[in-house]
Image (tube, rainbow, N blue to C red):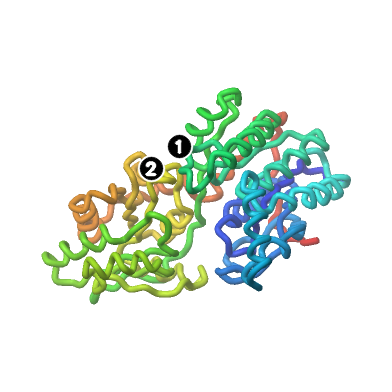
Amino acid sequence: MSARPTLLIVSFHFAPSPLVGAKRFSFLAREFTRQGFDVHVVTNEIRESAYGREDKSLPLQGTVHRVPDAIDNFVRFKERGRGWRRFVHGVARRLLSPVGLDYFWAGAATRRALKIARDLSPGVVIATSPPHAALIAGERIARKLGWPLLLDYRDPWSGYDWPEWHRNGWTQWLGRRIETRLVKRSAARVLNTPSMRQWFERTFPFASPAKNFVVPNGFDSVPTKAQPAAEGPLRIVHAGEIYGSRSVVPLLRAIQSLSERHPRPIRLTTFGALPAAERLRIQEARLEAFVEELPRIPFANLFPELQRAHVLLAIVSEHMTYSTPYKVYDYMASGRPILALAPMDAALHDLLAESGAGESVDPRDIPGIEQALERLLFAPAAANAARIERYRWVNLAQQYRGAIESVVAPTVHEPAPELPARAE
C-alpha cells in the first residue's frame, strides 16, 4: 500500500508515443512524481504511426499500465484491404462518431485501473481528452473508487461551435448529452487555453467556474546547440504538415514583397507535407521559389532545425480559434521568434502577446504579415525570458497542483526523489 497520495491518470497517448497527444502528460507525470505524488498512468499500447513508433525525447515517469485497444485491429484495418474492410470501417466511424473510434478502450482501461487501485492509497483520477474514451473511462473509475474526478481538456469535445463538416448535428447532440453527464460528475476541470474555458462555461453553465482552471501546455529549457546562419538565406521554418483551410500563400506573398527590399534571400521551409491543393495554389501564384518542402523528421532531429531558424511559423485556422498548436511551445523552447497566422480572436494571438514570444497577424492581412516578418527578421530581439518562464513544465505543474488540491484536502508533500518509470 502506497503512503503517498495517488494520481491515477487516464491518458490514451503517453510516452514514448510520438503522437502529440502524448506530450502533455508525459511531462506533467514527471513533475507530479517530483512533487511527491504516486503517479500511475493508464494508457494505450505503443503502436506504429505515421510519425514512427517512439519519441525518445519524452520523459517516462511513474508506473505505466498499458491497455490494448479492444477493437484496434477491427476498426483500423482499412489500409490492409479493400471492399468490405473499408465498408465496415466507415460504418464503425459513423456509429461511434459522438465518442470516437476508441470508445471500447474505455471498458478495458476501467477494468485495469480498478484492479491496480486495490493496492493504492486514495487519490484523484485525472482523465485527459482527446480521445473522449479517456474521459468516459475516467468517470467510471472515479465513480467506482469514490475518488474525485478531474477532467483535462487538450481540445474541446462538444463544448465548441464545430463546423458541420467536422461534427454533424447528430454527433454534436449525442456527444453533448454524454459529456454533460461526465461534467456533472467531475469535481474540477482543467482547460488548455482561456478561450477553451470561455467556450466550456457557455456550454456547461452549471459547472462551478471556480473549479474551471486553465493550465496551458509548456516546454523544458533546452541548451542552445545551434544558431541561425549569419549568411545565406533567412530561414522561416514550419514544423509539421499544412492541412485543412490553413495556407502558407499569404506568407509567401509577404516574403516575395519583402525580398524586393532586402538582399538576403528569404525562404520558408516546411518539415512536413504540403497537400496537393496547397501546392497548386503556390504554383498558380508563382511562389515556388520561396518555399522548400522537406519530409517530417523525428523531434530529436527537428529541434536543432528550429534553433537554426531565423523565424518559426505557426498557423491556426478560423475553425479552431480556441487552439494553441503544441508546436508553439516547442518553438518557445528553441528561443527563436514566432510568427503566427491566425484570426485575431484566436487563443494563439493572446498567448504571443502575453509571452512576448512573437507576433500574430490575420492571414488576410498580407501587408501586416510583411511588416511583422520584417520586425522579427531584422529588429533586435526583445528580452522576454521572464515572460516565457511561466510556460516551463516545472512551473505549470505547480499551477496544476492547485487544481488537484482544490478537490482534496490540502496536504504538503515533500518532493520525492526522481524515479525511473515502471511498466506493467
Query: Mark 2 packing: few (<14 Cα in 10 Å), some, or many (20+)?
Result: many
The residue that appears at 20% across and 58% down in the rendered structure is 374
Q: Choose top left, top right, bottom left or bottom right for residue 70.
A: bottom right
The dot on residue 78 is none
Residue corresponding to mark 1: 195
Q: How many marks?
A: 2
In the displayed structure image, the side of residue 360 where residue 89 appears, left or right: right
**Residue at left 33%, top 69%?**
279
Closer to us: 316 or 382: 316
Position above or below: 11 against 184? below
* Point 62% across, 61% down: residue: 59
> Residue 139 at x, y = what percent?
73, 38
Q: Position of residue 54 (x, y in %)?
A: 62, 69
| Residue 420 shows in this picture | no
User: Disc 2 residue type?
Assistant: Ala
Find out whether the residues at labels 2 and 1 contact each other: C-beta distance under 8 Å.
yes
194, 111: nearer the viewer: 111
Q: CA distance from mark 2 to mark 1?
A: 8 Å
> In the structure shown, which secondary structural element does the residue marked by tag 2 occupy?
loop
Query: With respect to residue 3, does 284 lie above or below?
Result: below
Q: Earlier in the sequence, mark 2 or mark 1?
A: 1
Q: Position of residue 314 (x, y in %)?
A: 38, 56
Q: Residue furthest front?
A: 83
- Residue beneath label 2, please? 346
Up-down: is 227 above or below 174?
Answer: below
The residue at 21%/53% (across/down) is: 366
Tell me which corner region of the image, top left, top right, bottom left or bottom right, holds residue 187: top right
- Amino acid carrying label 1: it is Ser
> Which quadrant would residue 47 be assigned to in this image?
bottom right
